[in-house]
């Protein structure tokens, strides 16, 4: 099938890790764009669980709605093992996750989202895609400056100047807390999407897939599990 110009203009590339946030973003994009491709980054994460979830989540989303199946396009996995050379954090080294001085958790990889967006834009350039979609969020975030709205706006400007393009960076979760993110999933795909996220996505920093809670799998104790479980508890409490 050849792509028309309007197909290209109506296409999105979703930064898709296999976690709750990026899965919700992927559903959001499938609801809005005529063609949706995904990109993931393998950068030597201590646990590959999240990356391993991606194919199953994509298949699950395609099975939810015929429109979504028709719109879901290629998946791109980029090897960014080089990030391991410049980071020394709990995501890539066998050290315990804990808050470090300055308030940032030591899962922090400096500027990680800037690198991801640069690679995503280069792929989007080649694929004729104008919209980049990511789950960056200022509300329930852990202090990451590369998740802020101002950073995203500056990044879009830098990409457009540097690649002479007109990319947009869409961040549907920017002003949502985790409770609202669960609710957005329900609005987009009903209880079936909420169940898919609970069962098939992974957020836990420790890569725990052995403990199952009502909000999904995880250790139940790390900062990512705490955010996810607390948001789910409030979502359920507020849902008749
Ligand atoms: Zn956890």
Image (spheres, grey):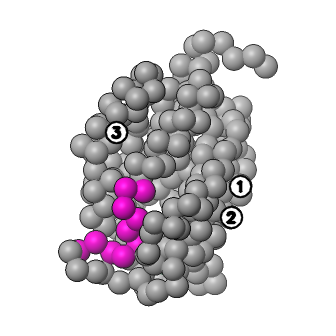
Which residue was labeled with disc 1? 55
Q: Residue furthest left?
A: 102
Q: Which residue lies furthest to the top in this view?
A: 5
Q: Give the crowd class for mark 1: few <14, some 14-19, many >=20 residues within 10 Å.
A: few
Q: Judge whether residue 106 is colored magenta.
A: yes
Q: Judge whether residue 221 is colored magenta.
A: no
- The quarter holding residue 211 reads bottom right
Q: Give the crowd class for mark 2: few <14, some 14-19, many >=20 residues within 10 Å.
A: some
Which structural element holds mark 1?
A: helix
Name which residue lies at 62% across and 79% down.
209
> Is residue 92 shown above or below 32?
below
Which is in the foreground here, disc 3 or disc 2?
3
| Residue 66, label in figure | none
Task: Locate residue 180, reporting x and y percent.
Answer: 36, 55
Could you tell which of marks 3 and 2 lies nearer the N-terminus? 2
Task: Locate residue 111, reporting x and y percent.
Answer: 37, 56
Which SS does the magenta portion mostly show?
Answer: loop
Task: Locate residue 206, reporting x and y percent.
Answer: 52, 80
- Mark 3–mark 2 CB contact (< 8 Å): no
- Mark 2–mark 1 CB contact (< 8 Å): yes
| Residue 155, label in figure | 3
Range drawn in magenta: 103-112
Would you say residue 38 is visible in this rendering? yes
Depth order, front residue of 175/100: 100
Which residue was labeled with disc 2? 52
């Amino acid at each position: 099938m050849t792509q028309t110009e309007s197909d290209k203009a109506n296409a999105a590339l979703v930064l898709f890790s296999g976690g709750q946030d990026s899965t919700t973003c992927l559903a959001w994009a499938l609801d809005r764009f005529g063609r949706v491709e995904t990109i993931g980054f393998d950068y030597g994460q201590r646990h590959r669980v999240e990356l391993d979830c991606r194919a199953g989540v994509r298949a699950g989303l395609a099975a939810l709605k015929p429109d979504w199946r028709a719109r879901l396009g290629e998946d791109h996995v980029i090897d960014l093992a080089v990030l391991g050379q410049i980071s020394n954090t709990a995501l890539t080294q066998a050290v315990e996750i804990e808050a470090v001085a300055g308030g940032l958790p030591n899962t922090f990889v400096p500027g990680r989202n800037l690198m991801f967006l640069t690679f995503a834009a280069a792929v989007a350039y080649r694929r004729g895609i104008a919209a980049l979609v990511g789950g960056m969020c200022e509300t329930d975030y852990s202090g990451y400056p590369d998740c802020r709205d101002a950073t995203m706006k500056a990044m879009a400007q830098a990409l457009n100047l540097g690649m002479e393009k007109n990319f947009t960076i869409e961040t549907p979760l920017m002003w949502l807390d985790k409770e609202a993110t669960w609710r957005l999933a329900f609005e987009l795909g009903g209880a079936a999407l909420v169940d898919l996220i609970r069962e098939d996505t992974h957020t836990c920093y420790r890569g725990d897939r052995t403990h199952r809670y009502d909000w999904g799998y995880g250790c139940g104790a790390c900062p990512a599990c705490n955010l996810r479980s607390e948001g789910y508890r409030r979502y359920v409490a507020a849902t008749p």
